[in-house]
Amino acid sequence: MSACDLLCDNVMQLAECDRQLIELTQGGLPLVPQPYHELARQMGISADEVMLRIQRMQDNGVIRRIAAVPNHYKLGFRANGMTVWNVPDEKVSALGEQIGALDFVSHCYHRPRHPPLWHYNLFAMVHGASRDDVQDHIAAIARLLGDDNHGSDVLFSTRILKKTGLRIRARE
């Protein structure tokens, strides 16, 4: 039985094959048309097995998500603001989908409120070439929300933080 014959059941029992998969992807997926096939080739397993293992690790909480992490500055977006909105809880999913579909929003998600200090339950990262552009985009979101907007704020980025995903040390 090889390490790839075992599927991980939890974080404490990470199969060697899953560890290898994390090591191969922690710097990003291969920049090829079929990245899972390339990983499979490198590991000597099938692409279906790579996808199964990734799904299992997501299901078990080892991997939270797989997403692109763009450098907004290199794309020409010099201003970035995390907007926070207070919207009716029963509408947060529908409103979040609408806001998340806007071309100037990179991600939008529901977060719990923490009254009395924090009344916001919908977050959306807004990008623009300038702060004025971001303010225009925020106004567009406010118009979209209409009467469902019960308050908002924006936290502007002041510097780029190093964005990294899961990191584990390679075995020697």
Image (cartoon, rainbow, N blue to C red):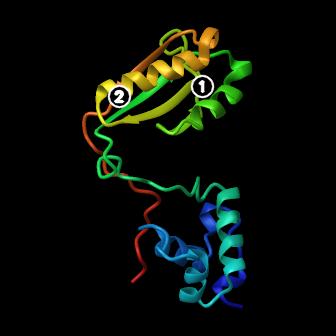
The one of 80 and 10 positioned closer to us in this rendering: 80
Kind of residue at disc 2: Asp
In the image, residue 16 sits, relative to residue 115, either above or below, namely below
Q: In what element is the residue under mark 2?
A: helix
- Up/down of 162 relative to 90, above or below: below
Where residue 111 appears, as percent x and y from the top left, is: 58, 29
Quarter of the image with the N terminus is: bottom right
Q: Residue at x 71, y 28 (%)?
A: 94
Label 1: how many residues lie within 10 Å, few (<14), some (14-19) or many (20+)?
A: few
Residue that mark 2 sits on: 133
Q: How many marks?
A: 2
Q: In front here: 120 or 5? A: 120
Q: Which residue is mark 1?
A: 112
Residue 112 to residue 73: above or below: above
Q: Position of residue 152 (x, y in %)?
A: 48, 15
157 sits left or right of 136 in the view? left
115 or 161: nearer the viewer: 161
| x then y, percent, for residue 4 | 66, 83
Where disc 1 sits, the SS reads loop
Q: Is residue 150 left or right of residue 128?
A: right
Q: CA distance from mark 1 to mark 2?
A: 28 Å
User: At label 1, which amino acid type do we have?
Assistant: Pro
Please report the residue visible at 43 percent of the width from the left and 33 percent of the height from the top.
Answer: 126
Residue ID at (52%, 9%): 116
Q: Confirm or deny contact between disc 1 and disc 2 (CB under 8 A).
A: no
Q: Relative to residue 69, is residue 16 depicted above or below?
A: below
